[in-house]
């Protein structure tokens, strides 16, 4: 039918099928800003449009419903001069635009709100944004943005003086806009899906309906015969080369235990076959034509089932080692099935697939038994956590196109260089034949550290010479993605009657799922980011990761820390109760402090030999005292409702700043002809503001305007190597490389200038903005560049530097909360949450706060609401955002605060440490502790759902 | 894929189109029909009734008369709408869905976890269709497909309350119920207690209603017990039968006593 509509003020007509999804129709009309995050469930809001002036979701509208109506998208918000609207500007300035995937939707929602209500309340803002799912920001800064707009419309420029850090630094620690925020909030092309060309084929994957099965036969002939099908892939026509999807540095501490398409499926949603077709409809139709016969096998879903005698083996193939095969390798392989894919370890990590063990390690310091013998009180508790989804707004997406004898991968990834290596290896080509272009990332949170779909799409593109677009559905995000590993953490603590810890023992069992990505390092990280929070001479740990048939697990923000820290911090409160001590007093007595040496790190090397490390900066003094004051510790109010009990809780937390001795970052800076700079950073900005950090580092060192520095990052052809954006490495490593490169360029600038000015470099300095002084005349960067790039010049000024270190810089934090527990319904409401966070010198304060808000709300969701549920066949029964249960703005605590504690770190660039990742490490513990304070029950298992709480209370059986 | 799309100008035309087509459905706001891609058989024909059905609100002879195409946000915002009904509309947690979904569509979709249906039944709401007028309760019980043009709700009688309970703000509800009482707190003359989320349709808890009117149920414990005995929710991803029974009993009982208090 012909659809007539008014789109952004202009009358348009277009022929389209009546039932076509409205997002598709808008794309045909040139609107790219309306995006899909939920496949039409009407949940996430990335599809927001204004329909006759009202916000609605385009994903649950068909094209015909637009006929005769007025539609506005974010493109309508720009002024006649192309400038952003005041709403968009405020969202950018308030730190609301992180990954930015649905920033245009947020801008439309706030615009509509202010058209209805010029001076809205907090509740009005909540209602206006009620349909916006935003995993990154935690929503709190949207309230601040609305206040700012209202103030400006009333003639006031600012509502609060921004809190600044970094002493006399010009940019570091000072508020400035994220460099890509304007582009994102305007809805400009920025993401992988925006790069697709009209000739792109669509790749779709047939997924296993069984949790564990052998593929007995597979017949793809009917699918291949379907008009429009380009190719069908099965185990018969793809490389059978074992690899790991873990985006870790090579050699990875993760087993190579999968192939592109296998003869065995190991989880519901595992790959069975793939179809490449000219369009999506054909690809989906072809999937239905593939005939598969399965031999269904018994499955194991948790650690107890996995380690039971006679348990089905998830990986029954032979085990090999590249180096360091254990002495009993032959006996391990005695019963191996030679027809099953082999498991290849790069080096020993304690794996024993013949016992469903993917990895295992233990260690410790001192003598725990002796410490327990000396204790007056001993507690031994067990805590379990669940499988958690990262749920990025932008579902996993890749676009791969052949270019001559190379392939170019437009990727939404945290690890462009690992992606290049893994794809090259799978395709059997060298790395110079693969280019990865990291586009803007619409949320990753760890799940985009792993190579989940790019390598299959790359094989499809390489083998057919056709461009390939592959994007997960939301269901695939749940059943075939990288998730947070369930864990069971047993904690044993011994203490003297005065609270002095004498022993700590932690036993971690991890449910690894079907494949071994991050099997060793996630649970080890749980130990290494929790036990060092307390000073105890006797401490030990044991870590075992079990294969099972749950969907794959991998990295998620916090890595292992949110789970082990939950266990340890609740155990500390349980110990305080046993001792009759105030919880905070017990924490204060034993906690880590600046200047101490962390001996336990000797045995926590995460895949390499560890070393004791000093704590050279620690902000816990201030964080704890400020947190105590803010929450008014020990003075909780009483509820007027007898069914509601109020409780307060606290905990401390830590993370790292990259992986010293393992990580490396590189950066190149070029001076352009007019004295401005292009920076090629290997760092992968995944929406957290890393490109802004790099920009600030360079401008700070070179004493030049921020606007004269442009960053191009994550393009493997252009920028030098970087390990990638994980393990909290961005600011510390990639920012450090940028600073080092800028320092190097600064030296070159002064040397060149000295030669021109007939003096020595020591006579010269750079004054803001970009002017060299101290010589016989002033020389600005433009003039210098003219000299260097002329026919008699010495050449373009370029500097490259790297950042590596063996120094540890730990960010710390203290979280406090107040909850209301309805003991009749079991529901817990978070009334107040205060996060006091030490990140060294925060480089981008607004975005640092935003990431903490986001991390905290995520982890509130993990602890209270979120849950992947499986039926008796091992199939996930809630693979959508709503029934899975992510938190929204309506769940934000009424009193939600983040304060940054400045503790200049001697090793990080300009005193910076990491910030984003740590913020998920506190909520589970602080909520469990507050619930106990409210109603006296210990929540030792995630989630703290109403039903689980009622069971703990004994209200229901 | 929807292949045929019609936008009739009258209810008669709409009904005629439905009779003449196979695999056809009425399309109101679209929040259910368009999501059918994911959950149910895809209709090949939709009959969009946006131009055929009224969407205004007026008061007539002690009744609130609401055009079935009214958007739920408008229902929530209109001061003439009884508070309990407006509250039920607001229970739909996102503004974008409230802006798109309609009252008639919500009734027609007949979801067991509808926020609107329990309170509409409790408040004795009626629908007008091409085949005449019937109560919402009868319309749903008889699984009629007639196109709803208006919904009328009696005004000024008794006390009503809608309640919901969910794990998080946007989570699927484990409780969605409506309560309406007439009389006084010491002498309840008429009671209607309707629970969604406990069966495959909204369920009137007649034993509880009778107990309230007879005075046999006068304290919270007895009311909770009676509610628990009147329902038998199936376990699903939202919880076990035990939990769902308990939480429905607690929340609905509280709503009953809130209504009693309002009656004075």
Image (cartoon, rainbow, N blue to C red):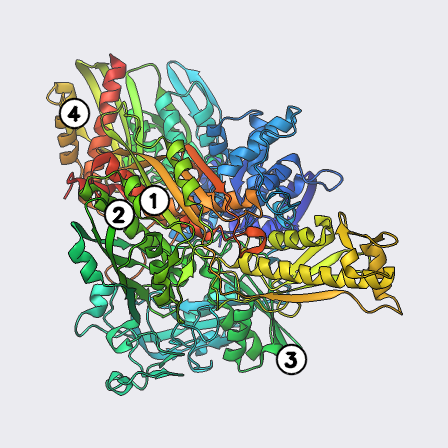
Residue A703 appearing in the image: yes
Residue A651 circle label: 1
- As helix, strand or loop, the secondary structure at mark 4 comes to helix
Q: CA distance from mark 3 to mark 2?
A: 59 Å
B142 left or right of A273 in image: left
Q: CA distance from mark 1 to mark 4?
A: 39 Å
Q: Are marks 1 and 2 in contact (CB under 8 Å)?
A: yes
Q: CA distance from mark 4 to mark 3?
A: 77 Å
Mark 4 Cα-neighbour bin, 10 Å: few <14, some 14–19, many ≥20: some
Mark 3 Cα-neighbour bin, 10 Å: few <14, some 14–19, many ≥20: few
Q: Are marks 4 and 2 in contact (CB under 8 Å)?
A: no
Q: CA distance from mark 3 to mark 1?
A: 55 Å
Q: Nearer the viewer, mark 3 or mark 2?
A: 2
Q: Which residue is mark 3?
A: A405
- Precedes in sequence: disc 3 or disc 2: 3
| Image x and y of residue A445, in percent | 46, 55
B117 left or right of B53 in image: left
> How many numbered circles are shown?
4
Q: Which residue is mark 4?
A: B220
Q: Give the quarter of the image for residue B124.
A: top left
Please check whether the numbered discs 4 and 2 fall on a single chain. Answer: no
Q: Are marks 3 and 1 in contact (CB under 8 Å)?
A: no
- As helix, strand or loop, the secondary structure at mark 2 comes to helix
Of residue B140 and residue A447, the one placed in the foreground of this image is A447
Mark 2 Cα-neighbour bin, 10 Å: few <14, some 14–19, many ≥20: many
- Precedes in sequence: disc 1 or disc 2: 2
| Image x and y of residue A632, in percent | 36, 30
- As helix, strand or loop, the secondary structure at mark 3 comes to loop
In the image, residue A39 sits, relative to residue B209, either above or below, namely below
The residue positioned 49% from the left and 72% from the top of the image is A456
Mark 1 Cα-neighbour bin, 10 Å: few <14, some 14–19, many ≥20: many
């Amino acid at each position: 039918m012909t659809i007539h509509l008014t789109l952004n003020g202009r009358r348009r007509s277009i022929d389209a099928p009546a039932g076509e999804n409205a997002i598709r129709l808008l794309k045909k009309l040139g609107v790219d800003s309306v995006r899909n995050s939920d496949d039409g469930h009407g949940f996430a809001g990335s599809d927001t449009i204004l329909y006759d002036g009202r916000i609605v979701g385009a994903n649950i509208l068909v094209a015909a419903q637009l006929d005769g109506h007025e539609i506005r998208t974010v493109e309508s918000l720009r002024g006649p001069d192309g400038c952003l609207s005041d709403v968009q500007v405020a969202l950018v300035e308030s730190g609301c635009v992180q990954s930015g995937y649905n920033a245009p939707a947020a801008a439309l929602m706030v615009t509509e709100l202010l058209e209805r209500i010029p001076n809205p309340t907090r509740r009005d803002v909540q209602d206006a944004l009620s349909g916006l799912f935003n995993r990154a920001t935690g929503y709190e800064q949207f309230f601040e943005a609305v206040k700012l707009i209202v103030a400006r419309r009333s003639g006031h420029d600012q509502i609060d003086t921004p809190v600044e850090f970094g002493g006399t630094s010009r940019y570091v620690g000072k508020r400035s806009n994220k460099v890509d925020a304007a582009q994102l909030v305007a809805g400009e092309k920025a993401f992988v899906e925006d790069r697709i060309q009209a000739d792109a084929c669509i790749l779709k994957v047939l997924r296993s309906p069984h949790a564990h099965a052998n593929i007995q036969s597979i017949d793809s002939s009917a699918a291949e015969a379907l008009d429009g099908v380009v190719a069908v892939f099965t185990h018969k026509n793809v490389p059978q080369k074992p690899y790991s999807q873990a985006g870790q540095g090579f050699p990875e501490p993760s087993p190579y235990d999968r192939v592109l398409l296998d003869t065995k499926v190991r989880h519901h949603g595992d790959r069975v076959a793939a179809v490449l077709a000219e369009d999506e409809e054909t690809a989906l139709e072809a999937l239905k034509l593939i005939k598969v016969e399965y031999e269904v096998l018994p499955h194991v879903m948790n650690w107890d089932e996995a380690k039971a005698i006679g348990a089905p083996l998830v990986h029954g193939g032979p085990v090999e080692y590249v180096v360091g095969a254990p002495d009993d390798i032959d006996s391990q392989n005695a019963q191996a099935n030679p027809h099953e894919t082999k498991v290849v370890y790069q080096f020993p990590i304690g794996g024993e697939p013949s016992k469903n063990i993917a990895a295992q390690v233990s260690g410790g310091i001192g003598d725990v038994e002796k410490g327990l013998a000396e204790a007056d009180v001993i507690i031994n508790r067990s805590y379990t956590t669940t499988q958690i989804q990262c749920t990025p707004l932008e579902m996993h997406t890749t676009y791969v196109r052949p270019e001559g004898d190379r392939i170019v991968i437009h990727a939404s990834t945290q690890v462009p260089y690992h992606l290049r290596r893994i794809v090259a290896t799978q395709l059997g080509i060298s790395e110079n034949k693969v280019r990865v272009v990291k586009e803007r990332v619409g949320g990753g949170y760890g799940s985009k550290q792993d190579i989940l779909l790019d390598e299959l799409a790359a094989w499809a593109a390489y083998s057919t010479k056709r461009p390939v677009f592959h994007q997960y559905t939301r269901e695939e995000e749940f059943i075939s993605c990288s998730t947070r590993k369930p864990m069971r953490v047993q904690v044993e603590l011994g203490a003297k009657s005065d609270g002095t810890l004498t022993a700590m023992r932690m036993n971690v069992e991890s449910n690894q799922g079907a494949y071994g990505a991050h099997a060793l390092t996630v649970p080890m990280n749980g130990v290494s980011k929790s036990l060092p929070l307390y000073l105890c001479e006797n401490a030990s740990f044991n870590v075992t990761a079990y294969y099972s048939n749950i969907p794959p697990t991998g990295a998620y923000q916090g890595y292992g820390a949110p789970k082990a820290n939950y266990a340890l911090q609740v155990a500390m409160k349980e110990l305080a109760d046993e001792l009759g001590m105030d919880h905070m007093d017990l924490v204060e007595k034993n906690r880590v402090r600046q200047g101490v040496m962390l001996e336990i790190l000797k045995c926590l090397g995460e895949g390499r030999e560890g070393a004791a490390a000093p704590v050279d900066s620690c902000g816990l003094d201030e964080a704890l005292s400020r947190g105590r004051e803010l929450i008014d510790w020990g003075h909780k109010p009483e509820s007027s409702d007898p069914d509601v009990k109020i409780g307060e809780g606290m905990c401390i937390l830590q993370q790292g700043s990259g992986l010293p001795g393992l990580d490396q970052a590189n950066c190149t800076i070029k001076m352009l002809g007019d004295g401005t700079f292009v920076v090629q950073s290997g760092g992968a900005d995944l929406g957290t503001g890393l490109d802004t950090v790099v920009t600030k580092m360079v401008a700070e060192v070179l004493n030049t305007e921020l606007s004269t520095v442009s960053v191009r990052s994550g393009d493997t052809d252009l920028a030098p190597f970087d390990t990638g954006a994980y393990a909290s490495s961005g600011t510390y490593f990639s920012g450090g490389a940028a600073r080092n490169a800028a320092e190097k360029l600064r030296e070159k600038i002064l040397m060149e200038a000295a030669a021109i000015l007939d003096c020595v470099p020591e006579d010269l300095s750079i004054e803001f903005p970009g002017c060299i002084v101290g010589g016989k005349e002033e020389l600005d960067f433009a003039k210098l560049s003219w000299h260097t790039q002329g026919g008699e010049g010495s050449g373009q000024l370029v500097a490259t530097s790297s950042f590596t270190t063996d120094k540890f810089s730990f960010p710390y934090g203290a979280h406090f909360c107040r909850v209301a527990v309805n003991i009749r319904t079991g529901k817990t409401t978070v009334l107040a949450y205060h996060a006091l966070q030490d990140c060294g010198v925060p480089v981008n304060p607004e975005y640092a706060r935003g990431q903490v808000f986001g991390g905290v709300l995520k982890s509130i969701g993990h602890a209270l609401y979120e849950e992947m549920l499986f039926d008796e066949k091992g199939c996930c029964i809630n693979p959508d955002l709503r029934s899975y249960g992510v938190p929204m703005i309506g769940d934000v605590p009424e009193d939600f605060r983040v304060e940054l504690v400045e503790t200049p770190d001697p090793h990080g660039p300009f005193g910076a440490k990491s910030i984003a990742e740590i913020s998920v490490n506190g909520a589970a513990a602080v909520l469990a502790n507050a619930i106990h304070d409210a109603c006296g029950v210990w929540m030792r298992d995630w989630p703290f759902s109403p039903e689980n709480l009622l069971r703990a209370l004994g209200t229901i059986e | 894929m929807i292949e045929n799309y019609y936008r009739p100008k009258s209810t008669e035309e709409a009904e005629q189109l439905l009779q003449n087509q196979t695999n056809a459905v009425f399309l109101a706001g679209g929040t259910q029909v368009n999501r059918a891609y994911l959950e149910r058989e895809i209709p090949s024909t939709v009959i969009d009734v946006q131009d055929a059905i009224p969407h205004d609100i007026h008061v007539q002879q002690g009744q609130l008369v609401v055009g079935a195409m009214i958007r739920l946000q408008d229902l929530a915002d209109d001061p003439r709408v009884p508070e309990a009904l407006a509250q039920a509309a607001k229970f739909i947690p996102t503004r974008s869905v409230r802006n798109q979904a309609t009252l008639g569509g919500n009734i027609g979709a007949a979801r067991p976890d509808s926020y609107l249906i329990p309170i509409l039944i409790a408040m004795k709401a009626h629908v007008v269709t091409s085949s005449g007028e019937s109560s919402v309760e009868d319309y749903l019980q008889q699984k009629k497909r007639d196109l709803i043009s208006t919904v009328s709700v009696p005004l000024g009688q008794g006390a009503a309350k809608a309640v919901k309970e969910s794990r998080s703000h946007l989570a699927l509800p484990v409780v969605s119920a409506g309560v309406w009482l007439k009389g006084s707190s010491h002498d309840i003359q008429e009671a209607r207690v309707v629970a969604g989320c406990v069966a495959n349709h909204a369920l009137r808890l007649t034993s509880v209603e009778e107990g309230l009117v007879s005075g046999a149920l006068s304290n919270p414990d007895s009311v909770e017990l009676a509610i628990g005995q009147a329902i038998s929710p199936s376990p699903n991803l939202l919880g076990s039968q035990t939990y769902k029974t308990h939480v429905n009993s607690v929340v609905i009982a509280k709503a009953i006593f809130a209504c009693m208090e309002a009656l004075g």
